[in-house]
Image (spheres, coloured by chain):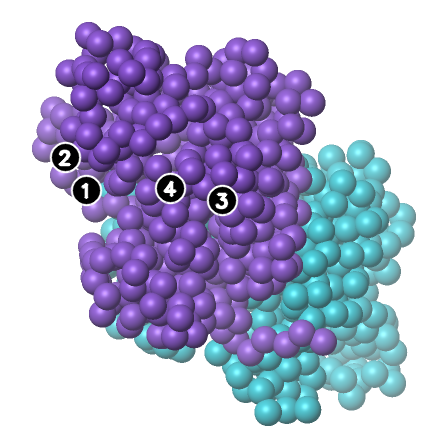
Chain colours: A purple, B cyan
Amino acid sequence: MDQFPLPVARIGIIGGGQLGRMMAKAAKRLGCTCVVLDPTPGSPAGQVAGHQIVGDYHDPARLRELAESCDVTTFDIEDIDTETLIQLEREGNRVLPSPSLLAVIQDKLTQKQALDDAGIPTAPFVPMPEPSPEAFAKFGYPLVQKSRRGGYDGRGVSIIRSPNDYGAHLPTDSLVERFVPAAKELAVVVARGLDGDCRCYPVVEMCFRPGENVLEMLLAPANIPAETAQAATELGIRTVEVLQGVGIFGVEMFLTESGELLVNEVAPRTHNSGHHTIEATVTDQFEQHLRAVVGLPLGATDQLSPAAMINLLGAPGHRGRPVIKGMAEALAIPGVCLHLYGKAATAPFRKMGHVTVLDPDIEEAQRKAIRVRELIEISGEGHP
Amino acid sequence: MDQFPLPVARIGIIGGGQLGRMMAKAAKRLGCTCVVLDPTPGSPAGQVAGHQIVGDYHDPARLRELAESCDVTTFDIEDIDTETLIQLEREGNRVLPSPSLLAVIQDKLTQKQALDDAGIPTAPFVPMPEPSPEAFAKFGYPLVQKSRRGGYDGRGVSIIRSPNDYGAHLPTDSLVERFVPAAKELAVVVARGLDGDCRCYPVVEMCFRPGENVLEMLLAPANIPAETAQAATELGIRTVEVLQGVGIFGVEMFLTESGELLVNEVAPRTHNSGHHTIEATVTDQFEQHLRAVVGLPLGATDQLSPAAMINLLGAPGHRGRPVIKGMAEALAIPGVCLHLYGKAATAPFRKMGHVTVLDPDIEEAQRKAIRVRELIEISGEGHP
């Protein structure tokens, strides 16, 4: 019979943001302890983990200190020094998802190549080490330029529709891919265990503000035909299987106007498009991730209620100690579940929290979420 | 418009057990910070709160330190020095539920008298300051003797069916009440806000091991006719309204064989019979309690899935560092949600965790919960 002394596992989390925070809470439930590595003292995850190492994700000594004090090390961000992680893994420390996979995914070009090599459908692309009007013209418009490294939440991505847009290009080592006129953007959150067992949450629909790449609203489940949901689920699972990933992976997809599914990007970590799983599904993505990396069986991913999710972003023009307006009024709406991340300072468009709205009718959930977004404003103390 | 700077509130929690632990997690979600008062360093709640004052619940200096450093002070236990709390409240510190109400409820005799005076149906009772065979005989058998103070989880309660059971009596200031042959034991978890708004979770059914008073299994919702559920809900709300309570209250009831509802006991705190609300309802009891004491609107109490809940108790004869057997096997059962409390040492029948099982079919949830109870054993390291 299986047997665990307490703590069941000591979990190292590289990155002390909101994902680590929600992971630390799940870890405690499972009888695990946590250590967080983050440069900001009292980080969102550090506040609940109980122990934080203050240090940079690229500092080999701090990464070593973390990995050597834990049974398994994982991460809530992607911008980590993978060379050190690979070395630590070689020395027998368990790091999951695998640092060599993280290295492939960190670089959007190698990620794309890996998916393409494995036969995963993606938008056509070419490497673009030195962007130029000629190179863009040769590939053809409209195109999407992505910097190979460091992009997230829409940073490092530029849509170039014609030569006139060249001023918006990124002057960096990048790739360009065909602009896909997507009918919808979908995401599939997939968990894969140490034993290869795969579980998939119901497909969600991501709505973006036109012209911006920040998630505006998430609808779970997506409003798509059953056969499309089935195909997206299978594609999500196949993607994580070809990558041999262990843990939670967010697989973002385009559903084209002709009904084709193309994988846009893979995140080797818990994902913004899975936040609703905390309230809306049996096992949330954070616990699921931990079950996977600790080597416990994966949990059920059944959804108990339709849900809409919005991020709470810092108001433009505001910095400093956060002030939350409209919180009480928003909480009075039935089904509103608020998550604040405890960040000490707000900044324009910084993710300060999120709200999941549960409602038996997903359109009603969506209306309530829009109302919450109108109500809640996160500004900085002392600002107008 | 309402406006809160972060933290939304500083919450003081007297008692660092599992209830405080789950409350601290909910507090972080709402943007609150927590300080826990508990004599054991690294208590279950202290591990997630971020800050613990190590001290006794009866130490006036530590209670003062806690209350004066927080916006609102609440508790996860009942055995607290209420005189100090009442004084602190007089000085303008917010303590909720009200310490004078806690004082009434702490003493099972005054609790019973308060309920009786307000016309809440309870089993007939008399005070029994000095138990004797004569006094018992005068009241008549079968009876239940309850010590006025310090009883919980079945301690401080003795069932005396006949003069032959006198050896099992409690030699202490107590009350005796008529033994009620209950068809079922029910519980209603009620939240009441600062503004008097009342919300009630669906009625649950508590199953006890014959002859013991420790909860064996909780079924949510209770398997009772709709009109009984309605009556129990109304009785639960009326009970909390007559007490003018603010926060979460667990109202335990007997459903007699003739279909009558009698209030057995009221707990002025989050309750073991509401643990399933974490996964099975929209707003869990811990967040609901905080919304109430902070003065935020109460949340929806709709249940999303039937649930069965069992406590995980320390194995008889075992002490020391906990070892959990059968955890992986139990987690492989779909719908099993595990909560370990992170207690450093086990002891016989100590509450070490709980498991909520979600299943669309409550009988299946119950079968799975029974299976989990067979699988999981919490023993002490180094013991057989």
Q: Amino acid at mark 1?
A: Ala
B334 relative position to B382: left or right? right
Q: Secondary structure at mark 2?
A: loop
Q: Quadrant of the C terminus of chain B?
A: bottom right
Mark found first going from the N terminus, 3 or 2? 3
Using the image as rendered, state which of residue B68 and residue B110 is in the foreground.
Answer: B68
Q: Are marks 4 and 1 on the same chain?
A: yes
B303 w.r.t. B73: above or below = above
Quarter assignment of residue B180:
bottom right
Chain letter of the residue beneath label 2 in the structure image:
A
Q: Amino acid at mark 2?
A: Arg
Q: Secondary structure at mark 1?
A: loop
Whether residue B323 is visible? yes
Q: Which mark is residue A294?
A: none
The picture places residue B137, in percent across and down from the top left corner, at 83, 77
Q: Which residue is mark 4?
A: A110
Using the image as rendered, state which of residue A289 and residue A332 is in the foreground.
Answer: A289
Question: Disc 4 versus disc 2: distance between alpha carbons?
Answer: 36 Å
Whether residues under marks 2 and 1 lie with C-beta atoms below 8 angstroms apart, the answer is: yes
Chain letter of the residue beneath label 1 in the structure image:
A
Question: Disc 1 versus disc 3: distance between alpha carbons?
Answer: 29 Å
Q: Which mark is residue A249?
A: 3
Question: Disc 3 versus disc 2: distance between alpha carbons?
Answer: 32 Å
Q: Are marks 1 and 3 on the same chain?
A: yes
Which mark's residue is nearer the viewer, 4 or 3?
4
Q: Quadrant of the N terminus of chain B?
A: top left
Q: Which residue is mark 2?
A: A319
Using the image as rendered, state which of residue B327 and residue B72 is in the foreground.
Answer: B327
